[in-house]
Image (tube, rainbow, N blue to C red):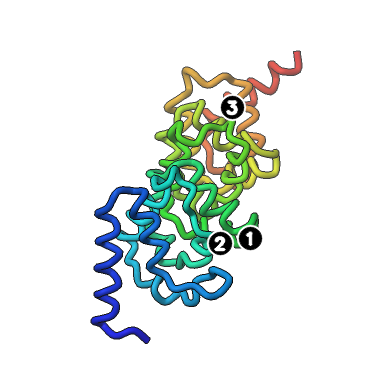
Amino acid sequence: MLGIGEREAFLARVEQTLDSSPDMAAKALDNLFPKDINGEVVSKVLFSLIPPGLFQRVILHLEQGMGGTLWPRYFYRLVSDEQFKALDISSLKITTIIRLFKTGLLGDLQENRRRFALLNADVVFNTFLGNRFPSSEPEFTYFCDLISNEQLKQCPLLSFSLLQFKRLFLSGSLGSAKRMVQQIPPSEIERFFRRHRTTVRSNFRNVFLGLCSEEQKRGLSALVIADAMTAKRRSRY
């Protein structure tokens, strides 16, 4: 157990390393953690001392230093849940996000889902709404599948353009699309379609309605249902 003085001294050294150039800081950060004979960090104690705000700076230095190549293999295992909760992934490079989850945890889908669910919902959707994570990336659908039901319930759907909606909700499998859409409150769906009523194609409205649960449909107005049903009738001819 470290004393107060030892903890303060360690955090001071972390701060000092971050004042260096990214290349020097990345090397210095790695040297702060004692390793065993196999190069593995002996304990999580020191790493867990880094507060969330400072941890964000550590991440940014590691991704910038040495062209982002100096990412110790032990780093991913040491990140605590509290550090993840405060992490703003929308400010990170795509390669860094991939390292922190899919690559960093060796593709452990269940653990990645648990970790991803810790992130703030606003941060998650800011990451996907921008063009920093294009749907052409092979990992895009993987990360869409990591978004938790609770995060989806907080989805700011009204701020989505039609293109952003299609990218996020319709890039994966039918099962994935249904899971994601069915977490959104009917009131948000209603507002989304009312806002885009003049630009949404009627057949798209019909497809979207097919992804909704019966409970969601009961919560939608006659206007949205009628538009979708009109599209369905037209598609038969």
Mark 2 touches mark 1? (CB < 8 Å): yes
Q: Position of residue 11 (x, y in %)?
A: 28, 69
Decide which of tag 2 and tag 3 comes sooner along the chain: 2
Q: Residue at x 64, y 59 (%)?
A: 108
Q: What residue would you read off at disc 3?
A: 205
Q: In the rendered image, which quarter is residue 90 located in?
A: top left
- Mark 3 crowd level (few <14, some 14–19, many ≥20, 10 Å Cα): many
- Local SS, label 1: helix
- Local SS, label 2: helix
- Mark 2 crowd level (few <14, some 14–19, many ≥20, 10 Å Cα): some
Q: Position of residue 76 (x, y in %)?
A: 51, 61
Q: Residue furthest front?
A: 37
Q: Residue at x 49, y 41 (%)?
A: 94
Residue type marked 3: Arg
The residue nearer to you, when weighing 228 against 143, is: 143
Q: What residue would you read off at disc 2?
A: 114
The residue nearer to you, when weighing 55 against 15, is: 15
Q: Is residue 191 among the parts visible in the rendering?
A: no
Q: Position of residue 27 (x, y in %)?
A: 39, 57
Q: Is residue 126 left or right of residue 189?
A: left
Q: Residue furthest right?
A: 236
Which one is in front in this view, the residue at disc 2 or the one at disc 3? 2
The residue nearer to you, when weighing 233 against 106, is: 106
Residue type marked 1: Gln
Q: Is residue 116 left or right of residue 48?
A: right
Q: Is residue 205 left or right of residue 47?
A: right
Q: What residue would you read off at disc 1?
A: 110
Which one is in front in this view, the residue at disc 3 or the one at disc 1? 1
Q: Residue at x 42, y 35 (%)?
A: 158
Q: In the rendered image, which quarter is residue 194 located in?
A: top left
